[in-house]
Amino acid sequence: MTSTKITAKNLLANTRLSNISTLLISLFILILLVGFSSAAQAQSHEIASTSIAENHIAAKAGTVSAAASDPVPPSSGPAPAAASGAAGVPDPEIPPAIARELAAMKAEIEELKAELRARLPAPVATTPSTSSASVSASPKINESGAPLPASSVAVSVPSSPLVASTPSASLATSSSSPQTDPAEAAAFTSASAPAPKPMMPDASTAIEQPAQVTAAQSGTPGASKPSKPDPFSLYDYTWLTGNPRIKEVPLDTKFFTPEVRFDVPYTYDFNHPADDTIGGSSEVFRAQEFQVTQAGVGGDFHWDNVQGRFMTQFGMYSETTPRNDASPGRGGWDLDTAYRYISEAYGGYHINALDGINVQAGIFMSYIGLFSYYQFDNWAYQPSYVSSNTPWFFNGMRVQVFVTPKLKIEPWLINGWQSYGRFNNRPGVGGQILWRPNGWFSFVGNQYGLGADTLGVAGRIRYHTDDSIQVKYYDRPGEFLDKMAFTLTGDAGCEHGGDPVAGTAVSCDTNGSKIVDGVRYITPKQDFLGFMAYNRWWFKKDLYAVTIGGGKINNPGRYLVLLPPINGATAITGTPYFTENPGNPFKAWDTSFTFDYMPSQYITFRSEFNHRAANVPYFTGRGGITPPGGDNGNPAAIVPGWTPDLVRDENRMTFAILVMF
């Protein structure tokens, strides 16, 4: 008898545990089915899955309902078979107390199912597998403030399990430009997604909060606001001169955007200089030779709102750019050697205010004169004088304030006019205003003042204004002639002050004079006035392009004229063969014809003809500008029995391969 009681108790306990385990397994299966059904592509699949789960639970728990309503004593014998999966006969081994407990558990399961259904949001369209966004840990913009090219390496943010996937979603946009091309629409669509964003938090924060993005897209109350577009990202600006045209950086990451450049020209000078030396240019330096103008390697760092950029300048630039800066002639530490191989190097921090504020210090591009320092970015290889003779870089500090996505205000505090150090005892100040209200118009204004930028002349102060517009007036992507645009740049400036007794005093407005100790000294007018204009035509989906342009300057005093490298002369040494004294006249003009073949966004094959002229002998003639036997090491002195061959004009052809990644 005792053995029979123990066996009955064991059977009862095993039966109870078996039924409870069955219910728990069923609950787990239900939760999995609800989760998978919410991620399915069709709502009908969700309903079908839930229905199967309900039937399964009912089949397993049907005996519980029967036992609770009509309990059968254990001695009543075996139960008849169930008529269907939805209604079964109670187990004779289950006592009434356990049956009531199981019924209560079933009710709780039904409540849990209802609560899960209530929490499911409306289906939101995403990509079939993941919701991917190229997220930036810190703002990624180029020198003009426009976002850097989009990365081909996106950070994939997994879709929330509560979001139903659909094949794709189309973002319709409108453009205020006269003609909206697909590239502009694509640029706007890309900007609408949470791609590189000056105000965006770091990447880890963006990845940890996919539900907030989902809520914002679905319009759920309390959802986070959609992110603002990047500055100058609403339209495609790759047509602008001074901007690179690439739209995708192959190895971009959320920490570093690499940049590699190669500029290799061959220039044929019709003057046939004996020493193959070309003067009067900041882009072309040798004739009848292949040369590497620049081999640049660098890029942009961006993480946790901290920014950094560097770019090298191996090749001709490492010699020709430092020699145009006279500031290393003041003081020690050989600044032109220290910075010789660096074209850009600065660090900074991004502030999440307005549409973004960047505070940066170091060597950065100036963009006075519209054209870029890097030929790949420009419509022509040899820009006109108002670009070639004005600063390519500044060394100092700038604050980029993006007031709106279409407007940037950028003040500068810098060492001087394209200088590594100060020329005298004071820095220069200036700033830029960049406004791009739509996809076909751009205005940039650069202003500079208060700098004492003549070495050894502390009282002479420089002022300069440089203002440009660019207009894309034709845009027909489907036509053979698919795009046309023009640029117009105007520059004006002057210097005033100096020592009349030493003969360094000048005037901004007119030729004047000053009386010192009863002696009248002449103060010549020293100013700068110039312009340039270019028109460009693109053909066959931008595979080919033709540019025609030119300009003119008037610069009495020659303070912005590039010194010819006669006998190795530099801005520090000067040369007696081409003086830059107050009152020295200089007028020059030029024109160019450029043909570009662009089979890839990363390369340009360029052919260009240039005609340049001046009112005084300035360009290298057939005899060259190098003394017999080479430079004698004393460019500031007369070489006995020798005179450089300077002429008033030159014609040359340049063929170049320009690469940027």
Image: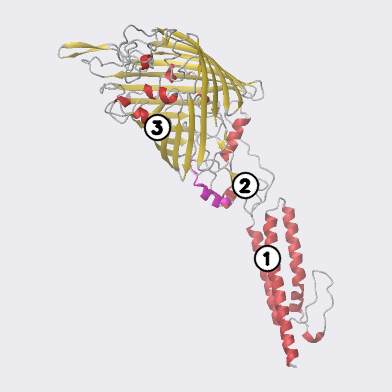
Amino acid type, label 1 = Phe
Residue carrying label 1: 28
Report the side of 450 relative to 271 (left or right). left
Judging by the rendered image, the residue that carries numbered circle 3 is 363
Determine if residue 30 is in view.
Answer: yes
How far apart in space, not on screen, are marks 2 and 3 (Cα)? 39 Å
- Residue 380 seen in the figure: no
Eye-nearest disc, 2 or 3: 3
Magenta stretch: residue 201 in it?
A: yes
In the picture provided, is 66 more to the left or to the right than 634?
Answer: right
Nearest to the observer: residue 125 or residue 541? 541
**Residue at the location (67% across, 73% down)?**
105
Give the x, y percent position of residue 82.
Answer: 83, 73
Residue 585 higher or lower than 602, as above or below: above
Position above or below: 114 against 175 = below
Secondary structure at numbered mark 3: strand
Label 1: few (<14), some (14–19) or many (≥20) C-alpha neighbours in 10 Å? few
Which stretch appears magenta?
Answer: 198-210
Q: Residue at x 68, y 53 (%)?
A: 39
Give, as a three-letter code, the residue at label 3. Answer: Ile
User: Which residue bears the numbered disc 2?
Assistant: 131
**Is the Cβ of the residue at disc 2 closer than 8 Å to that at disc 3?**
no
Q: Earlier in the sequence, mark 2 or mark 1?
A: 1
Foreground mark, 1 or 3, reads 3
Task: Where is residue 635? Give x, y as percent.
Answer: 33, 16
